[in-house]
């Protein structure tokens, strides 16, 4: 068997394995959630009404069903672009129009990104204006939806196209170790985005106002002082403009760090509960979870770029993904093929990332319990589970594979142990 045919077989097997696993896990989730729809878990009998539990179950099932359709459509698009020759036809059309220089290569990447975006758009629309609307979460108008879409496209082009050009230039000019220089570029770019996001990018989509509640501000500043956390400011975001979901987070890097509360969160939780939620978020900072995740991201990106550096010289990589070898050396084409194929293989390490994330959440909960009354965080979580229609009965295997947060029952059980 030739190398290109062998790679095609490996790719198809991996793709079938990914799609099959996603659909199997999703069907397990639907069956498990539906089977437990009639009974509130024992831990929540006194706090979550049966109607709210059933609403969360129905919400989870509908979102999961939509995801299953999306999985099948995305896989069909991937096959059409690769094995059925879609990428090759697009490349030939673009090269006839713009040539195979930097402009043509950038256009090829942009067209493929646009195609995948167009296919994803109906699912985003259904998610907002059908499912979220049905369950009372959507507060976004269609005008705002498409305005956000346009802003995202313009911002992505303004930021992404220059980075893409420099990447292609380095691939062409920096020799055999071009991937190392591209990695340095991407690390520097990501750090710059972390610094600029809070003050320049996020305000393009939401309004941020300083926290006006003086009592809450004093409480939070006291917590920050106790934990040694320095932030540039405390802000309230108009999350209610788009959704009824609530959240809080800190963003930025170094001196640009800031704490952000959704206005929906402030409207729902008490001062003690808000302090406990924030203590959890600060736990991620104190336990250096953000830095650890950045390091992992940087190491993985270095490995992936080194792999791409090798694959660009392999004829079987192009042929195995439906592109004739005469196009070998088109760096834009190599980027597109790698961008499409990599998620298929990386899918199978998803549980490792999920496991690490859940470990970090437990650690952040433990930190919050050391700084505030654990019962306040329990009360806050119960309210958020109910308000966000988060299922209390996820399928264990589905949760182990995907969930970035531990199941509600496990989190609350451990927090009550801290309280005891």
Image: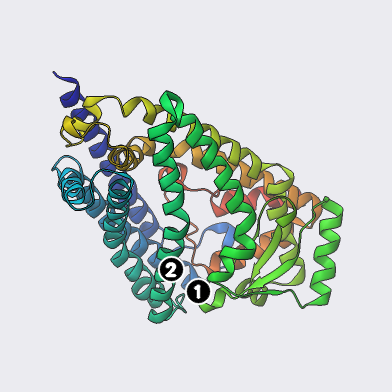
Residue at x 76% of width, y 71% of height:
271
State the image coordinates of residue 135 (x, y, percent, origin top left). 42, 75
Could you give the CA–CA distance between mark 1 and mark 2, rounded to whole angstroms? 20 Å
Between 320 and 314, which is closer to the camera in this rendering? 314
210 on left or right of 103: right
Q: Earlier in the sequence, mark 1 or mark 2?
A: 2
Q: Position of residue 109 (x, y in %)?
A: 31, 49
Instruction: Residue 116: name its quadrant.
Output: bottom left
Is residue 33 visible in the rendered structure shown here?
yes
Secondary structure state at the residue bearing disc 2: helix
Q: Quadrant of the N terminus?
A: top left
Residue 243 is tagged as 1
Q: Does residue 281 lie above or below 138 as drawn?
A: above
Query: Does residue 349 appear in the picture of this structure?
Result: no
Identify the element where label 1 is drawn: loop
- For residue 2, the mark is none
Relative to the observer, which residue lies in front, 183 or 28? 183
**Residue on which disc 2 sits:** 54
Of tags 1 and 2, which is closer to the observer? 1
């Amino acid at each position: 068997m030739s190398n290109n045919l062998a790679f095609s077989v490996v790719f198809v097997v991996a793709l079938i394995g990914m799609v099959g696993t996603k659909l199997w896990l999703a069907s397990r989730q639907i069956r498990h959630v539906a089977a437990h729809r009639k009974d509130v878990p024992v831990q929540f009998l006194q706090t979550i009404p049966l109607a709210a539990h059933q609403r969360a179950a129905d919400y989870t099932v509908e979102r999961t069903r939509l995801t299953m359709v999306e999985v099948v459509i995305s896989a069909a698009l991937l096959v059409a672009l690769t094995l059925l020759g879609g990428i090759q036809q697009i490349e030939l059309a673009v090269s006839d129009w713009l040539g195979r220089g930097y402009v043509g290569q950038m256009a090829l990447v942009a067209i493929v990104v646009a195609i995948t975006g167009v296919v994803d758009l109906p699912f985003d629309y259904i998610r907002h204006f059908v499912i979220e609307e049905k369950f009372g979460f959507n507060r976004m108008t269609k005008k705002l939806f498409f305005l956000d879409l346009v802003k995202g496209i313009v911002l992505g082009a303004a930021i992404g196209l220059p980075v893409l050009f420099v990447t292609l230039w380095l691939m062409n000019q920096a020799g055999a170790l071009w991937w190392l220089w591209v990695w340095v570029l991407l690390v520097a770019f990501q750090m710059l985005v972390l610094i600029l996001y809070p003050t320049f990018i996020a305000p393009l989509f939401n309004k941020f106002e300083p926290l006006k509640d003086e009592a809450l501000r004093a409480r939070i500043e006291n917590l920050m002082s106790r934990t040694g956390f320095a932030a540039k400011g405390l802000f309230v975001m108009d999350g209610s403009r788009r959704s009824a979901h609530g959240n809080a987070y800190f963003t930025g890097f170094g001196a640009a760090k800031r704490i952000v509360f959704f206005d929906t969160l402030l409207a729902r939780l008490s001062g003690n509960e808000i302090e406990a939620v924030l203590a959890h978020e600060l736990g991620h900072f104190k336990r250096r979870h953000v830095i650890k995740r950045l390091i992992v991201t940087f190491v993985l990106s270095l490995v992936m770029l080194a792999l791409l550096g090798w694959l660009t010289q392999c004829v079987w990589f192009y042929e195995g993904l439906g592109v004739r070898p005469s196009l070998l050396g088109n760096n834009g084409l190599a980027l597109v093929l790698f961008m499409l194929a990599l998620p298929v293989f990386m899918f199978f390490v998803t549980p490792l990332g999920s496991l690490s994330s859940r470990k970090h959440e437990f650690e952040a909960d433990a930190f919050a319990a050391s700084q505030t009354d654990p019962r306040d965080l329990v009360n806050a979580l119960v309210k958020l589970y109910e308000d966000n229609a988060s299922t209390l009965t996820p399928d264990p295997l589905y949760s182990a594979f995907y969930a970035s947060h531990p199941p509600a029952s496990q989190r609350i059980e451990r927090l009550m142990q801290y309280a005891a």
